[in-house]
Structures are given as structure tokens and as C-alpha cells.
Amino acid sequence: MFWLLGAAFLIAFLYVFSSILLPFLAGMVLAYFLDPVADRLEKIGLSRTAATVVILLAFLVTVTLALMLVVPVLSNQLADFLVRLPDYLSRLQALITNLDPEWFEQVLGVSEQELREGLTALLAQGTGFVATLFKSIWTSGMAIVNLASLFVVTPVVAFYMLLDWDRMIERVDSWVPRDHVETVRQIARDINAATAGFVRGQGTLCLILGLYYAIGLTLVGLNFGLLIGFFAGLISFIPYVGSLVGLALSIGVAVVQFWPEWYWVAAVAAVFFSGQFLEGNILQPKLIGRSVGLHPVWLMFALFAFALLFGFVGLLIAVPAAAAIAVLVRFALARYLQSPLYGGESSGTSADRELP
């Protein structure tokens, strides 16, 4: 009952205050992400305060350089892309419908006019869905006040959270009932392993993939290659979605830009396929491994569900919440399999057997 009431209170709290929680949650995520770096700096002789100051100064310098050098370029490409998007869609539609109208009519049973109308309706629906999605995210979690406070409040929250992280963990551990402290610690370790494996590992992987796609597409000469590459890399935390969206966008732009020089289109596709090979065979085993324990379907459901309930804030808490729920479900299932309810009264009490 205690944990159920605690979960209900947390959900209600997030629902009521989701519009102002973004900078605080971002600071907590940042502190959690950088805590291992602070621990390593402490081992080489720095105090916790000095380590925290060094880390946050380095982080702020990196973010400032990115804002000065990368963000203006991406902003210009985004503005140019939005202006040229209708023309790109029209030209892509014309290329598709002009390939072989007779083949479409014989094989698919649709005329050229029907195909044009269908593609127009499909493109309009897709554009409307994307616009609605971004508008929903903006109004629910990325309001102007939140965006401004993100650059003011987040560094302050991250500093104090990173400074007091170990003390907070020790304090919370001291509140756990002593009869159950080892069980709770093991559950917490499992949740931390799943969350850290994804947040730290997948976060680093997304940054590397974003750089790889952006540099590769730019070298190929694709229009908006930097924008599409970074976007595809940064949304790669959603399994398969980042690579598929990036591939579709880049192939669409490449067909309009390079056709009939098909080998440039193949070069754009090769950038993404090589990126997937790099991710699956090198980056993911090294950075994430098999310790995450989050099924891709469960992860995608959690991301969509929490985004629907809490907006952009929900995206920040979806992964740790999904990891915690998965660990608790596995723990409850292990308890059930060791209980008389599963094995019958003749199998003894659960206290007489060890959990796997």
C-alpha cells in the first residue's frame, strides 16, 4: 500500500506540475549522467566540490561553443528546409508518378490521376501529423518560459544535485527498513543498471551517430545533410525510428536533388546502412551491452505513453520509469514463482527458498 500510494502521488505530482518541471528534471538527468565523471575525478584527488565545478564549467563551455557554432547553422538549414519543403514534396510526387504510369495502372489498378491524388492526400496527412506533433510538444512542455528557464535553472539544479548526489543516496538508503534493506538495494541496483545503460550509453551513442550521419551526408553533398544527420542521430534513442526517419528524409531529398544520378542516392543510403552497422556491431555492444533489459516495444510504448500524459517532460522520465517498472515486474514475477500460490502449499513457504 505504501508503494502504491507513493506511485499515485508521483503520477499526480507530475501531471499537475509537468509544465514547470522541465528545467528541474533536465538538471537531475544531467547530474545523473555526469556523476560517474565526478566519481573518477574524486579518485584522482579532487574534492567533490572541485570536481563538480570542473565538470559543469567544461559542460557549459561545450554547450556555449555548440550554441555559437552549430546551432546557427542548424537553424538556418531548418528555416531553409521548411521554406523549400513544399517544392521538394511536389517534385518528389512528380518523379514517382512519372516513372511509368502504365505500370501503375496495370499492376496496382490505379490511374495516374488517382495516384497523384492519393500521394497528395498522404503527404498532406503526414505533414499535418508532424506539425501537430511538434505543436503538441511545444505547447505542453517547451513553452517560452520553460525554454528560457532551461538555460538558467538547469545548470544551478545540476550543480547542487551533482554536488550532493552521493549524500542523497546515502540518506535515502538510511530510510529503508533494515529488514528489507538488501532487497531494496538489489532492486535499486537493477534499476540503476538498466537506466544508466540506456541514459548514458544510448545518449553517447546518439551523439556519435548524429555526428557520423551529419558528416557523412555533408560530405556526400546532400542538401540539409547536417540538419538531417543530427536529427536522425538524436532521435535514435527510439529503437529503429531514428534511422528509418533519417533514411526516409535523406533519400527523399537525395532523389529530388540528384536524380537521375542514382549513385548519389545510393551513397546517401550507404551512409545510413554503414551507420546501422557501426551501431549494431561496435557502438551498442561497447556502450550499452546487454545490461539494459528494456525490450524495444516496451520502450517505445513508454515513450509514447509518457509523452501523451506529461508532454516533453514525459520523454525525460519515460526511460527511468520504464526501467523501474520492468525491474519491479521481474522482481514480482520471481516472488510469485517462489510462492505457494504458484507451487502449491506442499512446496513450502517463500521464506524457505532463495530467489534466483
Image (tube, helix red, strand yellow):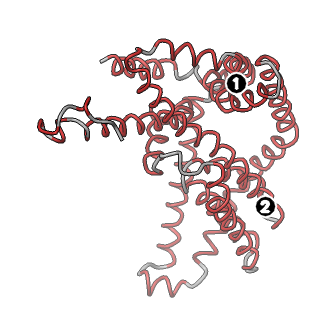
Q: Is 86 above or below relative to 72?
A: below
Which quadrant of the figure contains the C terminus?
Answer: top left
**Rendered image quadrant of residue 355:** top left
Q: Relative to 289, does residue 342 appear above or below in the rendering? A: above
Left or right of 340, for residue 6: right
**Disc 1 residue crowd, few under 14, some 14–19, many 20+, Cα 10 Å:** some
The residue where tag 1 is placed is: 150
Q: Nearer the viewer, residue 176 or 253?
A: 176
Instruction: Please rate how many residues cluster around mark 2, counting C-alpha atoms within 10 Å: few if below 14, some from 14 to 19, many from 20.
Output: some
Identity of the amino acid at label 2? Answer: Asn
Q: Residue at x 75, y 31 (%)?
A: 40
The image shows residue 107 at horizontal and vertical percentages of 44, 85
Q: Earlier in the sequence, mark 2 or mark 1?
A: 1
Q: Identify which amino acid the numbered label 1 is placed on.
A: Leu
Residue 151: percent from the left, percent from the top?
74, 24
- Residue 346 is situated, as x and y percent measured from the top left of the image, at 11, 38
Placement of 191 over or under 83, stated as above or below: above
Residue 220 tag number: none
Rounded to the nearest whole Å, what is the CA distance between mark 2 and mark 1? 31 Å
Q: Residue at x 61, y 61 (%)?
A: 280
User: Left or right: 97 with respect to 300?
Assistant: right
> What is the quadrant of the N terminus in the image?
top left
**Residue picked out by circle 2:** 223
Image height check: is 91 above or below 183? below
